[in-house]
Image: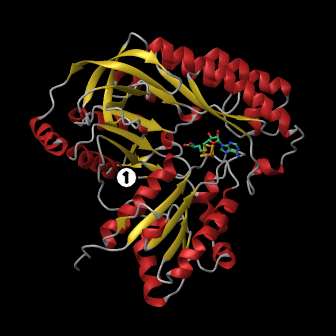
Amino acid sequence: MSEPVTGPAVFVQTWGCQMNEYDSAKMVEVLASKRGATRAVRPEDADILLLNTCSVREKAAEKVFSQLGRWRPLKEANPDLVIGVGGCVASQEGHAIRERVPWVDMVFGPQTLHRLPQMLDNVADNGAGTVDVAFPEIDKFDQMPPASADGATAFVSIMEGCSKYCSFCVVPYTRGEEISRPFDDVILEVVELAEQGVKEVTLLGQNVNGYRGPMVDGSVCDLALLIEHIAEIDAIERIRFTTSHPLEFSDALIEVFGRVHKLANALHLPVQSGSDTVLNAMNRGYTVAHFCERIARLREVRPDISLSTDIIVGHPGEGEDEFEATMDLVNAIGFDSAFSFVYSQRPGTPAADLEDNEPRAVKKQRLARLQDRIAEFNRAFMQSMIGTTQRVLVERESKRGDGQLAGRADCNRWVNFDGHPRYIGSFVDVEITEALDNSLRGRLVTREPVEAGIEYRMEASVD
Ligand code: SAH
Ligand code: F3S
């Protein structure tokens, strides 16, 4: 079968986390490889409009319906326009979306986005709308086009879904239970990315240390072993993963931090609360003492590792004392950054049935206190970088358009510095001279030799 040369233009509107961004990129890739689609920059220029949203923390459903309302005139002006809704909201609402918004043509979930080309054909051939939000225990990964790199960093999805069932969280219901991608497939994808110039991979999943990848010999590979294997691929110089869970933060994984220097010196480990009562109500499965013990062990092998976390303020069961316990934990660990949120009741989750008597205003005050404290830690961390030399993977020219380059240090912070664009895609050493709240500034100190081919290509495009 011959593939079309140019196909429809697709515009994707994404709201959500890295997982959603990743899924959106895959939607475009799958339509590009199977139907020759190209990416549209504006909805007005598109033949296909896709909406991909996350409902983890927000009442995303209303946002979806109002966006669809804004797209309605486009559909009226062009009846051939295909509109699709994907992501968590689609899995939760399913058929209800087409009942409420009949001009939507396709509704698909995170686990069925690989079937978009067939859904599209269905709409074109029969004019029929499609709703496909199942959790097939299958080959979503198998049906994806081969990995394609855009620059020197890439996300690699290693598992889908989550089976932890935290009381407050919709993910197990919207993305389904954990399912790991086979070991060989992951390695192959990383090798393919490396061949295209990727030097840093981030292993992606809702609960990556639940990774249990089947291997051809019938054994099972865990995250620690997977990282060791990826580290063997020469061209991959830096490895990250997100997001992991304190419960399965195994000794083996800590040992890998000690042994594998390619594993970046940063860890995002969501703790959610510093109170055992609340952790229990959250069904997190660990205690504060367990979390602290894991971090202490990790710091034995990586004393200066950068630690970040997620914290929920105002989960049912959190009173003043429980919140103070969270502040104590934050102070004890000294996270250098954190994502923190006021608890938001998600329909269908166990926490939605728990009694919750704390006023929202109180929760917001607590959140503000917590965020102030974390901001202090963040500033101290950024200041501590001044004078150090950081190995930076240069990703792009700085967004400010001031001729600077931007890349990320091992600790995952952005670093801006003066340099020739030919360094994009390479590791360089940068001495940090200035600390801002969200990024660092520095001076290029050493340059790794840039491979001749890349240099030539860059020079040619720089002009
Ligand atoms: N393992 C996932 C966690 C998904 S949700 C990941 O990779 O990110 C991300 C964060 O959102 C959680 O760690 C939690 O802190 C927050 N969150 C999830 N559900 C929430 C809710 N109902 N209310 C407030 N915050 C929530
Ligand atoms: Fe959600 Fe808890 Fe899993 S926060 S993604 S159910 S680890």
Left or right: 409 as drawn, with respect to 320? left
The secondary structure type at the circle numbered 1 is: loop
Asked whether residue 158 is in view, the answer is: yes
Quadrant housing residue 36: bottom left
Quadrant housing residue 144: bottom left
- Residue 139, compared with residue 230, is above or below; it is below
Quadrant housing residue 104: bottom right
Q: Looking at the image, which residue is at 74% across and 24% down?
A: 369
Q: Quadrant of the C terminus?
A: top left
Q: Looking at the image, which residue is at 50% across and 13% down?
A: 383
In the image, farthest residue toward the top = 387
Q: Quadrant of the N terminus?
A: bottom left
Q: Residues within 10 Å of mark 1 (few under 14, many from 20)?
A: many
Badge count: 1
Colouring mode (rainbow / by chain / secondary structure / one colour): secondary structure
In the image, farthest residue toward the right = 357
- Residue 6, compared with residue 158, is above or below; it is below
Q: Which residue is mark 1?
A: 182
Asked whether residue 143 is in view, the answer is: no
Left or right: 100 as drawn, with respect to 36? right
Left or right: 138 as drawn, with respect to 171? left
Please name the amino acid that badge 1 sits on: Pro
Q: Position of residue 407 (x, y in %)?
A: 35, 31
Residue 166 or 330: which is nearer the viewer?
330
Residue 36 or 344: which is nearer the viewer?
36
Left or right: 78 as drawn, with respect to 397? right
Q: Position of residue 81 (x, y in %)?
A: 48, 78
- Residue 318, compared with residue 330, is above or below; it is below
Q: Looking at the image, which residue is at 33% across and 26% down?
A: 392
| Quadrant of the picture in which ligand 2 is shown | top right
Q: Position of residue 204 (x, y in %)?
A: 45, 44
Q: Position of residue 445 (x, y in %)?
A: 26, 16
